[in-house]
Image (tube, grey):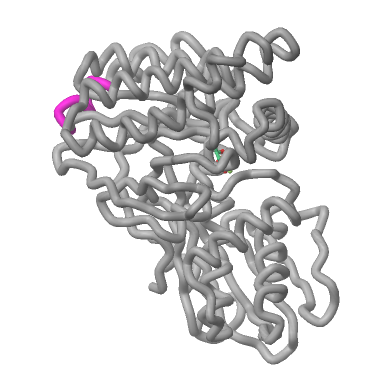
Amino acid sequence: MTPEAIARTLFRQKFERNAELTVYAPGRVNIIGEHTDYNEGFVMPCAINYGTAVSGAANDRGIFRVYAADLQQYDEFSLRQPIIPNPEKKWSGYVRGVVKFIQQACPQFQQGADLVISGNVPLSAGLSSSASLEVAVGKFCQQLGGLALSHTDIALIGQRAENQFVGCQCGNMDQLISALGQQDQLLMIDCRSLKTQGVPIPPDIAVMIVNSHVKHDLVAGEYNTRRRQCESAAAFFGVKALRDLSITQFRQREAELSAIDKDTAKRARHIVTENQRVLDAAAALGKGDLRRLGELMAQSHDSMRDDFEITVPQIDYLVELAQLALGSSGGARMTGGGFGGCIVALAPFSKVEAVRKIIADNYRKQTGLTEDFYVCRASQGVRIC
Ligand code: GAF
């Protein structure tokens, strides 16, 4: 059953009436442009055909009653009191945070609601299950309250919930792609201007995702540390964000920064080179140049491993295997925040089996972990079902 069918059915069972509204928002996979979003740079993700559904209806009690079907947990909070986190239920922070910031943006929103959440984005895999929940809840409230909020507004409210309520200093990529994704397209996003450009995925090209099952936890310090290091690099170079630094400008003072703080210099090198790689990858895909795309994805991975230092050996190994199977006919790299999660590969459908096989034959033997392999479809962003 789809998440929306599960959410709708369970709503009937739990709340003993029919849902008025069902909303679905997808997770995402990022093809290239990692950690560039909070540096106000470029990213190129697509929404995937795994997501989160929220099904529900208004109530006249001024409260939100929320049932998370997959966790079999319930949460309840009032709209008439300040909305604060429920420390026992981490997932509820994504709902409470979004409702809180929806209310800040639209103080007229006082509508209580009952809702059921169900999703199929693998959890803690770096595929943005939390962003999909935030965007689905935001759209649900927008629709229920007839609020004048665009999909971009909803995405930014989701990011705010994550930053100021949940406590993860993430950028805006995950929520934006969950809100704005396009069927069969990657979306190049300028994370400063929020301008987007669709980059069609050629019909013979598959988007493969391999879950390493090494768990990551974004809220854990490493992500926020990277963000602080990028900010201090921007301050060193006297720019608002690393987005404003060209590779040439970086090289001119790289040694000077490195002498002060080697790690900060490496973080900056990843960001300035990664921004350029996103632009080059969009051009390569536009020309159908898979060899070039593969080179750029490989450079991106090496840069995440050596300069940003966010990969783990199991992920490096998966990428190595995928690259071996692909040769020059596609690319593979880690995707997402890092420290585990998934790799992504882009290659002709004719190569899917070779990638699947080389990983199945070797990954478990080498690491003791069993991978999950998905061939995804680039999907539309948030929608009413
Ligand atoms: C996580 C964050 F939530 C995003 O904002 C982004 O920084 C990504 O890591 C790395 O590119 O998914």
Identify whether 167 is placed above or below 139: above
Residue 364 magenta-highlighted: no
Image quarter (top left, top right, bottom left or bottom right) of the C terminus: bottom left
Residue at left offset 85%, top offset 77%: 81
Identify whether 155 is placed above or below 327: below
Identify whether 355 is placed above or below 383: above
Residue 350 magenta-highlighted: yes
Determine the quadrant in which ligand 1 lies.
top right
Q: Does the image show residue 1?
A: no
**Which is nearer the eye, 313 or 159?**
159
Residue 297: image location, x then y, percent: 36, 24
State the extent of the magenta-drawn residues as a range.
349-355
Residue at left offset 44%, top offset 52%: 177
Quarter occupied by residue 95: bottom right
Give the main secondary structure, helix, strand or loop, of the magenta stretch.
helix
Question: How many discs mark residues in the rendered view?
Answer: 0
Quarter occupied by residue 280: top left
Identify whether 32 is placed above or below 261: below
Residue 131: image location, x then y, percent: 55, 53
**Which is nearer the eye, 299 or 68?**
299
**Which is nearer the eye, 197 or 187?**
197
Q: Position of 291 compared to 130: left or right?
A: left
Task: Farthest residue to the bottom: give it.
Answer: 60
Image quarter (top left, top right, bottom left or bottom right) of the N terminus: bottom left
Task: Farthest residue to the right: give it.
Answer: 81
Residue at left offset 71%, top offset 39%: 219
